[in-house]
Amino acid sequence: MAKNRRMRAAGSFMGVFVAIALAQVQIPKIAPATHDVRPGPGVKVKRLSDYFSGIARTPGDTAVYIMEGAEPGGTVLVAGGTHANEIGGSMAAIVLVEKARVERGRLIVIPYANNSAITYQDPARPGGPRSFEVKTAGGERIFSIGARLTRPEHQGEADPPGTKAASHDSAMEISPRDLDRQYPGKADGNLTQRIAYAVVALLKKENVDLAFDLHEAPPGSRLAMMIVANPKNAELGAEAVLVLEAEGLAMKLEESSATFRGLSHREWGDATRAKAFLFETPNPASRRESPGDPVSDGVWPLAKRVGIHLKAIGAILGAYNEAAEDKGRIRIGNLPELEEITKAGLGAYLR
Ligand SMILES: [Zn+2]
């Protein structure tokens, strides 16, 4: 009898313990942010939660656009908005969804990879703009500017005490809300880990050959105008850098660190068969001292940064196709030339 009571007591103690453990991650059921993206003809729209249901009906779910060429070939993933203040990447992704014509293979695009981070003001830049307008043939369109990290209320758990927000100036600081520090993710983790897990699930399910994560960094910083490559595809990056240089665009190349983990180029490439790359264009708004205009800067306007992302993708695709078997090649047409988009403006390449 006494033994039974003790066992019941122990059981209820365990029950309380399990409940506390489960209560640690509670991701709010909030509808994910929506955006003005106008897909071109034949573009299929899916959700990131189609690849991992653990982010369904959470602020981490986001639209995934799939474009398929008439000829079969390899598969490319382009992700923008991993850091939602780095608008050059998300806008390059949107130009692809709206204007690119995939002729061979498949192109999968996630314009807002961290769709929670787009929903709030960047604490690092309290007075900065939350949106910007682009004039297009279809009228004026408005796009959001968000923060670098997952919104704290969406994460499902508090940051551990002493956590410092990671930034490009202090890349070794790891925030649990930084999507580009949480790969390959965790199915039962916080929201950021679950988003990361979903992206890796997509890479595997769609058998992605080439994957690009589009970022921005402060002008003049070590990372600005950088291509970071997983070591297994660094040679491909080097070939592309030579082509870009011959065409007048100087980009640096760096290999993923062996010890600094959690970054897309490192973990996508290690966890899947994809050749993984990350690009950094210079965004004047990310300067710590005297941040500049994220859209209309005289030296680094948004249209030019979008053009650089697309040109770098084109150069790596070119190098990849040269080495690929015929059946694995990928051809994407109707991409703007860097000079054209810089001159004509972003709106000329949106619907
Ligand atoms: Zn970034």
Image (cartoon, rainbow, N blue to C red):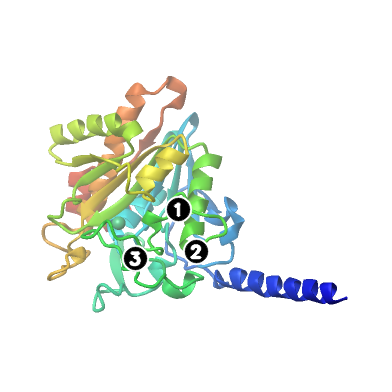
Q: Is residue 337 above or below residue 331?
A: below
| Residue 236 point in image, percent of width and height | 29, 30
Q: Is residue 212 above or below residue 244?
A: below
Q: Quadrant of the N terminus?
A: bottom right
Give 27 or 78, whichever is nearer the viewer. 27
Find the distance from the CA under tag 2 to the CA under tag 1: 27 Å
Camera-side residue of 172 and 182: 172
User: Which of the marked residues, 1 or 3, is nearer the chain's N terminus?
Assistant: 1
Q: Earlier in the sequence, mark 2 or mark 3?
A: 3
The image shows a total of numbered marks equal to: 3
Residue at which label 1 appears: 39
Helix, strand or loop for disc 3: strand
Kindly report the distance in space between the C-alpha atoms of the residues bearing marks 1 and 3.
16 Å
Q: Which residue is denoted by mark 3 in the rendering?
A: 139
Some atom of ligand 1 lies within 8 Å of the CB belonging to the residue at label 2: no
- In the rendered image, residue 227, in percent from the top left (x then y), is placed at 25, 43
Report the side of 105 relative to 286 (left or right): right
Mark 2, residue position: 191
Residue 287 visible in rendering: yes
Neighbor class of circle 1 (other Cα within 10 Å; few <14, some 14-19, many 20+) is: many
* Three-letter code for the amino acid on which mark 1 is drawn: Pro
- Can you name the residue that lies furthest to the right here? 1
Question: Residues at badges 2 and 3 in contact (C-beta under 8 Å)?
Answer: no
| Three-letter amino acid code at the position of disc 2 | Leu
Image location of residue 180, percent across then percent down: 37, 55
Secondary structure beneath label 1: loop
Judged from this view, the residue extending furthest toward the front is: 2
Q: Position of residue 84 (x, y in %)?
A: 35, 63
Q: Residue at x 13, y 69 (%)?
A: 289
Chain-order first, disc 2 or disc 1? 1
Q: CA distance from mark 2 to mark 3?
A: 35 Å
Q: Do residues under tags 2 and 1 come within 8 Å of each other at their CB atoms?
A: no
